[in-house]
Structures are given as structure tokens and as C-alpha cells.
Amino acid sequence: TVGPLVSEICFTFVLAAFLLHRYGNFAQHHLLVTVSVFVAWYFSFIIIFILPLDVSTTAFRQCLHDSESHSSGHHLPWVENDTTGNITVPPATPSPDGCHQPWSFVPEGVLQSLWRVVYWTSQALTWIILPLMQSYSTAGEFTVMGKLKRALIENAIYYGSYLLIFGILLVYVALQPGISLDAGKLKVICITASNTWGLFLLVLLLGYGLVEVPRSCWNAGHRGHSLRYAYFKASKLSLEKSEAQDKLDDVLEEVQLAAGSVTHQHPLRKHLEVILSKVPSSTGAKGNGRGRHRAHPEIDALSGAAVTEKSLVRLHQQVIRALQQHGRTQCQWTTLVEKALALEDVARNEESPERRFRRSAPHDHPTGCAPTLEWYWRCCVRGWSLRILGAVLALLSAALVWSEMTFFVRQPILTLFGVFHRSAESSHDYVAIELMSIVTIGYLCVCAYYTVFRVRVLNYYYLAPQHQTDEYSLIFSGMLLCRLTPPMCLNFLGLIHLDTHVTSEAGRMETAYTEIMGHMDVISIIANGFNIYFPMLICVLCLATYLHVGSRLLHWFGFEQFLGDDDMTVDLVNEGRDLIKRERGRRQRVALGESRRRPQARSATARQDEPALPTQPGSGTMTRSGSEESARTELLRGVEPLDYTEPSWERYQRPEPAWHRGEQPPRGLFDDV
């Protein structure tokens, strides 16, 4: 039956939709971007979750094939039973009755059709659609054709390199004796080029992720290390956030100048309105061109002559990228501050004798569990759980590195995953095969994608929950999933010796996945060299990552890295501690202001709901205390409440209140120093 297959397809659909809803924003993102990213995520998850069914089905077909081969006249030698002395047939010889059909068996031809649709759709997304869409989202042109033209120009080098590789491979195949080019050979060349590039990226990413993922879990169990690393990241991110804020301020200044120089009757005004529509209303850039116009009287003579469509296109692109960078840094800063504050709460509660978890901000992120239970989880259990998980992942990484180095050895089988698969296949344990497959593929995906969103050079992309991820990062994640998942699964099939171009074993059944992917038999230098021996570089990269070679080199070149007791690291940790302390004070003042405003709002609402009493002669007299209370209430009602959450870029829109020497200075002036 196809029940398990349909169930997993529906499960992956729900999973992709849930994750896209968590990280994306259906209301603000373009519909085409949302649909494309969903298809990319959905088809990549299908490969990850359906491939174990393909592996177990292939194991069942292998059992049937061996049974048919045995019954067709292949005579095996007789062996003697060591315990009884009787002559028996070895029990490893399969029989048709001994091949138990797996619960997730998929009929012949179903998976081939599924892989054909999934694979070629994913390739079209990762090589053509998503790169164009990524450039289209940041293009500054004001028409669809203009944006498409800009996207094609920006991807010219990108596509040119692929066409060059494809041309070289095509010439190489054409010069081979006895090989004729047809549609099938061209398809194999395309698959070869895609898998070669994907495996090259995979080796680089796994060389870092297989070490850093277990080490991060282990270090997360040490509260002191996690808190110091959060302080370090806060110091670096604060500088990046300030630079993004300054860049946004500069771009908004240019928008103000353009708004003041282009009148409403100007032909380019419609393009300027498109730019103004992307500027957040809180910045005050909309409709404030008159003030800027008065500040720059030389613009009167221009009347928009200095503003051209080309300059507006450049300005539009700058606004898009500045807002994107500003939003990224703000989102990452908020997430990092919340994490640092939570770690400080854990550190403070660990020393509490009450064993009841108390938060510094009780209104933030309530867990819904009892304070005592939360104390035991956060202060006792969680740390040890992360350390145990880190140790288990370290063993899994070691097994993967060993298997990557030895999976090309045909006999005997040295890969641990290959040995496990053959053992489970001989015992017809299809559930164990599927569990091993899903765990291994999932861990490979985690290690590879963790590297992309962790390495500082690629910090431009991020995935933030609560609908905070921008379109550019979502498109990049979909493109990365489609590009890395197929070669990653081929690499996994090589680890368990289910790819005949690795094992060259006669009589082995192929999975439906490799039937569609094909084998790299056309170009021998790639099939026999690059895709087999190049994974051995994972061992070298893992060793370099374990010894922090890359971090030390970057630190030597001036890029600050977290290196324990280094002087620069200590200074950045101390600076980050001060920044988090300042942010905690700011949030406490905001919470205090809100708590003070709520009773005033409730009392004002209650006074409005009270019925008016009829006035009588002589009732207008009031006592001294009553008049003072009424006057005080009126004064408080007229004072504008302080708001500490206003965006900092509004500072150039309003004149700050003057303070004279003889007046009382404001309270709390140096709280943040």
C-alpha cells in the first residue's frame, strides 16, 4: 500500500507550512516569494523523509532478487553445524517465504515518478528561479521588466561560471572515443555538474558542522561559557547595529533631499512615492520634504533637475538594503538580549536557596509551569541534558567522519553505517533501516545548514522566529536546501553502500532515487576521483575546526573571535556585559512607565463612566485638599507620557528640549552610563 508514503508526504507538507509560518511573514512578503520558498522547503523535506522508505523498499527487493538467484540454480556449499554435526544449508540463504514485506513498502514506479518531479523542480528552483528572485527582491528599478533586467545582469557572472563548466564537460565528453552525445548524456552531464558543486559545498560545510554542533551543545551545558559568549556576541553585534543605524540615517537624509527637490507635478514623483512607501512611517521621512527644502535653499533653483531616474533607482536600492540590514541587526539584537537576560536569570537563581525560579521580568515569556519545576529544569537538568546530547552527537560525528573516509573501500565494508545496514537487511529489520536513515540524513542536514547560518562571513543571512525573517534570507534558505539536499542524500547512499558506482558490486539493487539521479559514469575523473576521495578532506577540515585554526587565523588578521582568555576577547566580553546591563535597565524603566500609566488609564475610564451629578447652589465650594487633588490630577493628565521605545532615528525630526543652567536637571540622566 501507499498509505505510509501518503502519510509522510502530508506530514512534510504540514511541517514545511508550519516552519514557513513561523519564520516567514505571509502578510508582508510577496506571494510569489512565499510560494517558491514553500515549494523549495517542501520538496527538500520530501527527499529527507521519503528516502528512508526508498532504502527499506530496496532492501526488500534485494531479498527477493537474492531468492530468485538462489532458486534459479545457484548451488551454495554445504556447511556443518558446529553443535549437532548435521549437514545443513546456511541460514543466511534467503527464500521467497523469508522475505517479509516492509510496512512502508512502495509499489514499483511510484517513487521513480515522485523523485523525477521533486528533483527537477528543485534543480529549476535552485539554479534559475530563486537566484533571479533573490536579485529581483533587492533591485532598485521601478518596473517589472527593469527588475528582471537587473536580476539577469547581477546573475550574469553566476550563470556564466556554470555555462563555462558545462561547456568544458560537454567538450570533454564529445572528445571521448565511442561516446555519442544525446539527450540522456546531456542530462547526465547536468546532474554531474550539479552534484559536483553540491558535494564541494557539502564537504566544506560538514567539515565545520560535524565538530561545532556537538561542541556547541556541550558548551551550552556550561552556563558560564554560554553567558560569556553571549556578552561577546552582544559587543560585536552592537557595533554592527550602530553601523546599520547610521547607514539608514544617511539614506533617509538623501530621501529627504530628494523629496524636497521633486515637486508633486514632476514626472519622477511617482518613482519617489514608491521609495517613500518603503520608508517606515516612524522615521518621519514621508511628507517632511518641506522642512528639508527650506534647509537647503539651493534646491529651489533645481526644481528636481538634479534628480534623475538613474539616481532614484540607486537611491531605491540603497533604501531596500539599508532597511534590510537594519531589520536584520535589530532582530538579532533582540534575540541575543533576551537570551543573555535569560542566562543571567539562571545564574542568579542558581544561588537562590528557595529553589523557585524568579524572573527579572515576570511578564516576559511565561512558561506556564511551576516555579520549582522550572528551577530544577533550568538550573539542574538542562545543563546535564545538553552535555549528554553533546557527547552523543560527538560519537555520531566520529562515526560519520570514519564512514566518509572509508566508504569507498568495497571489501570488507568498513563504514559503520554500511555494516549496520547490511546487518538489518539480512535480519529484515526494515524499521531499524528507516530509523538509521532518517537520523543520519537529518544530522547531516543539521551540520551542513548550521554552518551556513553560524559562520561570521555568512552572517548576512538569518532565520528568526516570530515572522522576523526577511525575504532575502528565506530565498537563500530555500536555494540552499534545494542545492545541498540531493548530493547529501547521494553521499548518504554511498555511506551505506547502496550506490553501485561506489561499490561496483554485482547483483545489488539500486534505489529509485539513484535511478533518477543516475551515475557519473560518463566523466571518469569526476566519478572515480572527486566524488569518492574528496570527502576524505572532511577529516582535515574537522581537525582544523577542532583546533580553532580558522578562528585563530581570522583573529590574527584582525577579525575578533571568541578565543577564551585572549585580551581582546576579555575586553569585548566586559563591554558586552555593560551593554546587557544597560539594556536590562532600559527595559525595567519601560515596564515601570507602563505600570504607572495603566492605573491612570483605568481611573480616567472610571471617571468617564461615572454619571454626572446635578449641581446645586452652594455645591461649587471645595475644600483645600480637594482642590489640590483636582489640580494635581489635571496637571498629570496634561503631561505627555515618556516613551522609551521610540525609534532612535527620529532624533533629527524633532528639536530636543532646551535645558537652562538654573533649572533642575532631568532625573536618571546618567543611569545608562
Image (cartoon, rainbow, N blue to C red):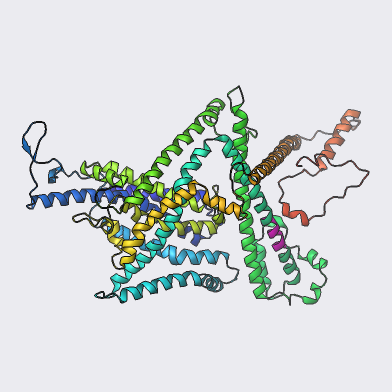
Estimate the x, y position of residue 442 in percent, counting from the top left. Answer: 39, 47
Estimate the x, y position of residue 51 in percent, counting from the top left. Answer: 32, 51
Quarter of the image for residue 182 reads: bottom left
Quarter of the image for residue 91 reads: top left
Up/down of 555 relative to 84, above or below = below
Is residue 250 within the magenta segment? yes
Estimate the x, y position of residue 501 in percent, counting from the top left. Answer: 27, 59
- Looking at this view, is 352 or 320 the one in front? 352
Quarter of the image for residue 616 reads: top right
Estimate the x, y position of residue 163 in percent, counting from the top left. Answer: 42, 72
Whether residue 130 appears in this view of the structure is yes
Say how many tags the image has: 0
Q: Residue at x 43, y 52 (%)?
A: 540
Whether residue 27 appears in this view of the structure is no
Up/down of 621 relative to 63, above or below = above
Is residue 181 within the magenta segment? no
**Magenta span of residues:** 244-252
594 left or right, relative to 344: right
